[in-house]
Image (cartoon, helix red, strand yellow):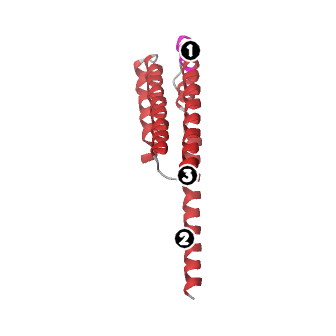
Amino acid sequence: MKGLRGLLLTLVLVALAAGLGAWGGAKYVLRAEREPSLHSFLHGKLNLSTDQKAKLEILETEFAVRRRAREAELRLANAELAAAIETQHRYSPEVKSAIEHFHDVMGELQKETIVHILDMRAILTPNQAAIFDKRVSEALTEETK
């Protein structure tokens, strides 16, 4: 009887966890679909001039190259972590080093992304910048709402 009760409790907990996970995932996806990316927001909501669009295109092209390079570094760091875990099967100095490498690369990507956002802001008029600033703030805090 105790075994059956334990099994039923486990099934209930698994179903509850699955339901909460599905709800959270759906909420995240629906929010992501409603809110445009910063680039879409810039192009679609701020009525950029022809000159601003040209400058933005240059910024986006340059950042895309840097972002792809950092993303390749992230994939390599993930592969290093996977290899360290597969080899060590414990939290070893190699695993710790691989995690730190991944975090370093992720941090650099985040810094470059923030610099890119500020570079985009620099081409905006004061009124556009105020609207942009509000959207950036919303994007950075949307997970906490």
Where is residue 86 shown, x and y percent of the image?
Answer: 58, 48
Where is residue 127 shown, x and y percent of the image?
Answer: 42, 22
Residue 58: numbered disc: 1
Looking at this rendering, what residue extends furthest in the top direction?
51
Three-letter code for the amino acid on which mark 1 is drawn: Ile
Determine the residue positioned at 55% across, 64% down.
17
Determine the residue positioned at 54% across, 10% down.
51
Three-letter code for the amino acid on which mark 3 is drawn: Lys
The residue carrying pointer 2 sits among few (fewer than 14), some (14 to 19) or many (20 or more) residues within 10 Å by Cα, namely: few
Three-letter code for the amino acid on which mark 2 is drawn: Leu
The question of residue 47 being in magenta is answered with no
Residue contact between numbered discs 3 and 1, judged by CB atoms under 8 Å: no
On the image, which quarter does residue 62 sit in? top right
- Mark in the foreground, 3 or 1: 1
On the image, which quarter does residue 66 sit in? top right
- Mark in the foreground, 1 or 2: 2
Where is residue 52 shown, x and y percent of the image?
Answer: 52, 14
The residue carrying pointer 1 sits among few (fewer than 14), some (14 to 19) or many (20 or more) residues within 10 Å by Cα, namely: few
Mark 3–mark 1 distance (CA, rounded to whole Å): 35 Å
Residue corresponding to mark 2: 13
The residue carrying pointer 3 sits among few (fewer than 14), some (14 to 19) or many (20 or more) residues within 10 Å by Cα, namely: few
Q: Is residue 140 left or right of residue 17?
A: left
Residue corresponding to mark 3: 27
Which badge, 3 or 1, is on the more N-terminal residue? 3
* Residue 87 visible within the image: yes
Mark 2–mark 3 distance (CA, rounded to whole Å): 21 Å
Determine the residue positioned at 58% across, 23% down.
64
